[in-house]
């Protein structure tokens, strides 16, 4: 998109390893993903004439030219002299820097490493990454020995399968938990949309299709861009776009983790608002004093899924003082958790015998 639209709302996927930005194009009824100008990885293993290189060549803040053997080269200036370098050489330098940083931190020499690549990399891009790593380590080109290459690939494939089998099983467990939390059966699912680079792994796709009894997987969206795509549509909706496609969007926000309290010396968390509860919401619970003649009660607010509060996240503390002396369990408190539209949590406690109320706000 060449024209800049003032006041446009965008959707941002702030990922752990990959971040992405999308924008709703009203005239075309679609989302456009904005190119990441600094993403050199996509150039690795590609030819200069490839679409992936040419598509964003003018949007990048650095100059890309055709080098030897049709490889893209990046042009830069160093000490007033124009130079060029391949994406593979840049990756090799980065790997060297990371290795040196690890050695400095560990205080020992690093001799081996496992290098991951984006799931969307094709074979040429994967090979280019291996070449960059191997060349930097041993100053040799492994491709010159076909037998060694075959043995290495076989060993790596075997190791990959052995290492990842438990992770694949965990993936399906997460799907089962998701359906259970939503009170749904897999037969109720209309479409299975793949989100995240790891969903490109053939084994993951195979297991998902088997779990959903052969239902075809939806691959219309780029798995790396799906979250930003949805965020862009929501941004358009919240910005008041009159386009019917975004007007009809309804978002149900929920609590991502359970919220609860720990009373006095109890080590367990008493859940007040279970996870996946739609917000806004109000939930209440009744709690009693745990000792004879107890004059103060502390309600510690936690967030998490563990039964034990030590494994959850402590949010704040609500302390009730001036409780009239009485036998254990006689004084009762109405504790209320109130989450508004903006996700702001207000925790209040009312001493039933006197009507006295205190509260805190947790943003």
Image: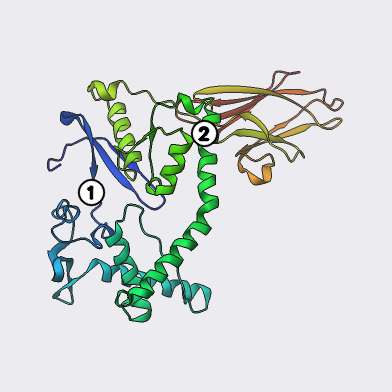
Q: Quadrant of residue 313?
A: top right
Cα gap from disc 1 to disc 2, whole angstroms: 32 Å
Specify whether 343 is left or right of 97.
right
Sequence order check, earlier mark of 1 and 2: 1
- Front residue (pair 223, 152): 152
Q: Quadrant of residue 314?
A: top right
Q: Residue at x 22, y 23 (%)?
A: 243
| 101 w.r.t. 39: above or below | below
Q: Position of residue 329 (x, y in %)?
A: 82, 25
Q: Which residue is mark 2?
A: 178
| 322 w.r.t. 55: above or below | above
Q: Quadrant of the N terminus?
A: top left
Specify whether 330 is left or right of 193.
right
Q: Is residue 198 visible?
A: no
Q: Residue at x 23, y 60 (%)?
A: 43
Q: Secondary structure at mark 2?
A: helix
Q: Which residue is mark 1?
A: 35
Q: Quadrant of residue 264?
A: top right
- Front residue (pair 322, 21): 21
For the residues bearing labels 1 and 2, Cβ distance under 8 angstroms:
no
């Amino acid at each position: 998109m060449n024209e800049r639209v003032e006041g446009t709302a965008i959707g941002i996927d702030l990922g752990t390893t990959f971040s992405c930005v999308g924008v709703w194009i009203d005239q075309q009824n679609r989302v456009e993903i904005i190119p990441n100008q600094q993403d050199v990885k996509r150039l690795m293993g590609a030819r200069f004439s490839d679409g992936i290189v040419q598509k964003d060549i003018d949007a990048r803040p650095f100059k890309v030219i055709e080098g030897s053997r049709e490889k893209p080269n990046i042009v830069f200036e160093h000490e007033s002299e124009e130079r060029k370098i391949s994406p593979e050489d840049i990756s090799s330098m980065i790997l060297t820097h990371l290795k040196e940083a690890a050695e400095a931190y560990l205080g020992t020499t690093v001799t081996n490493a496992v290098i991951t690549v984006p799931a969307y990399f094709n074979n040429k891009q994967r090979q280019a990454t291996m070449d960059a790593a191997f060349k930097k380590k041993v100053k040799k080109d492994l491709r010159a020995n076909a037998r060694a290459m075959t043995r290495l690939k076989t060993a790596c494939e075997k190791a990959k399968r052995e290492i990842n089998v438990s992770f694949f099983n965990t993936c399906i467990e997460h799907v089962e938990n998701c359906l259970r939390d939503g009170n749904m059966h897999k037969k109720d699912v209309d479409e299975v949309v793949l989100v995240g680079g790891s969903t490109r792994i053939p084994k993951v796709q195979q297991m998902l299709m088997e779990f959903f009894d052969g239902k075809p997987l939806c691959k219309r969206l780029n798995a790396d861009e799906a979250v930003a795509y949805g965020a862009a549509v929501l941004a358009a909706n919240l910005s008041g776009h009159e386009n019917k496609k975004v007007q009809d969007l309804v978002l149900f926000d929920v609590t991502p983790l359970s919220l609860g309290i720990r009373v006095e010396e109890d080590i367990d968390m008493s859940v007040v608002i279970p996870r996946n509860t739609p917000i806004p919401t109000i939930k209440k619970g009744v709690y009693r004093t745990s000792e004879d003649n107890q004059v103060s009660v502390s309600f510690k607010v936690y967030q998490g899924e563990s039964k034990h509060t030590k494994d959850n996240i402590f949010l704040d503390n609500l302390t009730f003082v001036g409780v009239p002396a009485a036998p254990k369990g006689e004084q009762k408190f109405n504790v209320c958790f109130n989450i508004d539209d903006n996700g702001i949590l207000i925790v209040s406690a009312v001493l039933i015998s006197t009507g006295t109320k205190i509260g805190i706000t947790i943003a």
